[in-house]
Each structure stands twice: as C-alpha cells, then as structure tokens.
Amino acid sequence: MVGIRTKWDKVQLSVTIYPEHARIIEKILRKEYSKPIAHKNASEVIRKAIEYYADYLGVRLNDN
C-alpha cells in the first residue's frame, strides 16, 4: 500500500486487493447487499472498514 498526500490535505492510497474483495465492494456500491448501506463511493466503504478494524484492534481514533 502506498499513500500520497494530496494538495487538499488528504491521502490518496494505492492498494492491491484480492479480486473477491473487489467484487464485494462492487456489490456494496450497487446495493446488492442484504443490509442497508449509506455508502456512495469506494472511499467511504474503505473508510468504514478501517474504522471497524481499528475498533476491533482497540485503536483509539481521534477526530484530528
């Protein structure tokens, strides 16, 4: 995974994922998932996944 800081103070990530994970993200974005979702793009899906994983690991996230 490679992160590049953009001029808008965001980090653009380049990652390699397994094809089955890409298919899951595509299904989520097409709303072909059995649970309600509020995500409209892949970055929101990834952000939420990172938050859930951080919570699972016990990492405290601050809003800064």
Image (cartoon, rainbow, N blue to C red):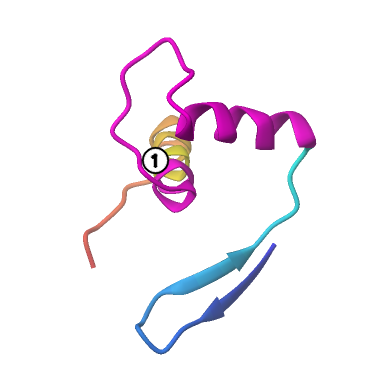
> What residue is rendered at 74% in x and 28% in y?
20
Lateral position of residue 47 relative to residue 13, left or right: left
Lateral position of residue 52 relative to residue 60, left or right: right
- Is residue 46 highlighted in magenta? yes
Q: Where's residue 22, x and y in %? A: 67, 37
Q: Where's residue 16, x and y in %? A: 75, 52
> What residue is rendered at 48% in x and 47% in y?
42
Q: Where's residue 43, x and y in %? A: 45, 53
Q: Which segment did they paint magenta?
A: 19-47
- Is residue 23 highlighted in magenta? yes
Q: Choose top left, top right, bottom left or bottom right for residue 38.
A: top left
| Quadrant of the image containing the C terminus | bottom left
Question: As drawn, which residue projects farthest toward the left?
Answer: 63
Identified by mark 1, the residue type is Lys
| Quadrant of the image containing the N terminus | bottom right
Lateral position of residue 32 relative to residue 10, left or right: right
> What residue is rendered at 69% in x and 57% in y?
15
Q: Residues within 10 Å of mark 1 (few under 14, many from 20)?
A: few
Give the number of callouts: 1
Compare residues 22 and 55 and report the one nearer the observer: 22
Residue 41 higher or lower than 9, as above or below = above
Q: Judging from the image, what secondary structure is the residue with disc 1 in?
A: helix
Question: As drawn, which residue projects farthest toward the top?
Answer: 34
Residue 44 higher or lower than 24, as above or below = below
> What residue is rendered at 31% in x and 18% in y?
36
Q: Choose top left, top right, bottom left or bottom right for residue 37.
A: top left
Question: As drawn, which residue projects farthest toward the front?
Answer: 30
Compare residues 19 and 64 and report the one nearer the observer: 19
Provide the residue designation for mark 1. 48
Question: As drawn, which residue projects farthest toward the bottom?
Answer: 7
